[in-house]
Amino acid sequence: MWIRDIGKGFALILLVTLLQGCSGGGWTERERTVIFRSDSVMFVTTWHEDSVQLRTPSVDVAPEEFQSEELKTLMAKMLRTVTDPSQDGVGIAAPQVGINRRIIWVQRLDKEDEPFECYVNIRIDSLFGDTRRGPEGCLSVPGYQGMVTRNNNVVISYSDLESGNKVKEQIEGYTAVIFQHECDHLEGILYVDRADTVYVNQPWMEELRQYDYTRPGWW
């Protein structure tokens, strides 16, 4: 009985600790370390070596942190990372750079000049319309592609960093696919979980060899 009670006490402490860590509050020391010690092009986590990081669901950024130096720095470095020739992606999610927060960058291929835009506390509210099956790759699954079926239309909601209000938007086409891929990262899901086929992209494999993807010593 005593052992059982000790076990219950430990479980309660563990539960409280987990809830505190997932409350979407202020930045942790680990998050600050990753944000400020990272180079302008951040280290991108990979499915073989960082599965726990990539499989952990992300939490919100608290409203009081919307104008914080941490968020501004993280957003800027994420953009620099996804657009760097070593990555050259159309989207990136915060877990891919070691931060389990609901933040993504998406290239809006459906807009003039195809700008990259950042979305904080984003969620997909609904999926609808026809489905489409097509190839997907991922910065965290380098050198591979897979065939994935996605919906052609999504409705997203996210926080406006100036007002704090929730914004809703409907997106369609290939850009909607990018949003689904990136939002999956925030739930700990990789495209390989949804793919019916995964294969080596040989030209990409060859391209990867020209860049240094060494993990930082402080990581």
Image (tube, rainbow, N blue to C red):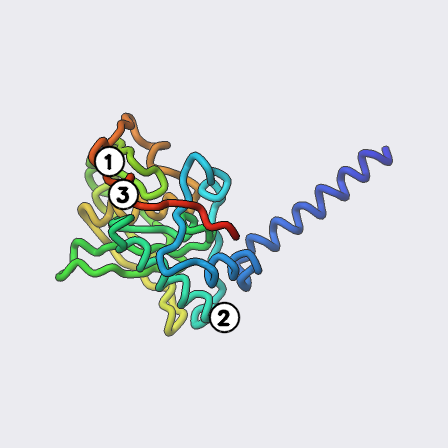
> Residue 54's quadrant in the figure?
top left
> Residue 198's quadrant in the figure?
top left
Secondary element type, mark 2? helix
Question: Residue 176 in the image: x percent, y percent?
Answer: 24, 48
Count of numbered labels shown in the rendering: 3
| CA separation in Å, label 2 and label 1 | 44 Å
Say if mark 3 contacts mark 1, CB within 8 Å: no
Q: What residue sits 41% from the left and 45% below the top?
A: 214
Which residue, given by chain and number where applicable, does mark 1 sit on? 206
Which residue, given by chain and number where applicable, does mark 3 sit on? 210
Three-letter amino acid code at the position of disc 1: Glu
| CA separation in Å, label 2 and label 3 | 41 Å
Q: 92 or 120: nearer the eye?
A: 92
Q: What residue sits 46% from the left and 50% below the top?
A: 216
Question: Residue 3 in the image: x percent, y percent?
Answer: 83, 34
Which residue, given by chain and number where applicable, does mark 2 sit on? 64
Q: Earlier in the sequence, mark 2 or mark 3?
A: 2
Three-letter amino acid code at the position of disc 3: Gln
Q: Residues within 10 Å of mark 1 (few under 14, many from 20)?
A: few
Residue 35 image label: none
